[in-house]
Amino acid sequence: MTFRLTANASILTIAATRGGFFLRALAVTGSLCAGLMSPDLALAEQRMAVIPTQTIYPGEVIDRDRLEEVEVTNPALSGDYATSTEQVIGKVTSRTLLQGRVILVSALREPYVVERGKAVRIVFTNGPLTITAGGAPLENAAVGDLIRVRNTDSGIIVSGTVMDDGTIHVVAK
């Protein structure tokens, strides 16, 4: 009697031949294959997800005290969900996050630096020339967003990029 052991991805094939009879057993279990691998590889395959420990409502900034990292036990769970707290902390939720449910990355956004209607400083720079003016943003925006802003002195609407300090840098057309 001879035995042959072959492991392919998630299929374990054990074949035994004896006197012309061919017996074949297939075991398609991830846990069995993981048991045959080294412990380091089995640990590397553990998926983690971030869940809220309480309900978080739209517009709220997410902090570490309201989050928990858990191991994913549902093999059918797929999609773009947060896998570490660093992906979530400091972000603002755009929809209600329920306690104990995974947090989808698409439900998060960067906090707004500029809010619609609140006074901002518009900055135009061209070489050594710098012109500043007061402005009123026409939309909410985070750092790096391109938005429209109305110059409060002239009433002209221009587009610019929101900077870290809350100013809007306008470029020449």
Image (cartoon, grey):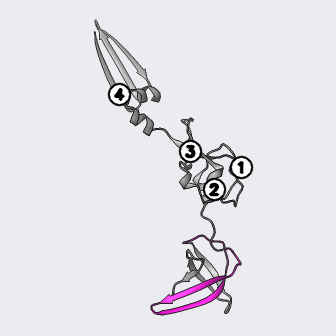
Image quadrant in which the N terminus is located: top left
Task: Point out the tag, 1 or 3, that comes first from the N-terminus.
Answer: 3
Q: Is residue 94 left or right of residue 22?
A: right
Q: Residue at x 45, y 91 (%)?
A: 127
In this view, 108 is above or below 37: below
Q: Earlier in the sequence, mark 2 or mark 3?
A: 3
The residue that mark 2 highlights is 63
In three-dimensional space, the C-alpha distance between marks 1 and 3, rounded to whole angstroms, equals: 16 Å
**Which residue is tagged 1?**
55
> Which image quadrant is residue 89 in?
bottom right
Q: Locate residue 5, reporting x and y percent.
A: 32, 21
Which residues are drawn in magenta? 115-143
- Spatial CA span between label 3 and label 4: 29 Å
Pointer 3: what residue?
49
Q: Foreground mark, 3 or 4?
A: 3
State the separation of the CA atoms marked 2 and 3: 16 Å
Q: Assess disc 2: are there few (<14), some (14-19) or many (≥20) residues with their C-alpha within 10 Å of its C-alpha.
A: some
Disc on the earlier residue, 4 or 2:
4
Q: Residue furthest front?
A: 65
Of residues 20 and 33, the one nearer the viewer is 33
Q: Which mark is residue 7?
A: 4
102 to 156, vertically: above or below: above
Q: Farthest top residue? A: 19
Q: Are marks 3 and 4 in contact (CB under 8 Å)?
A: no
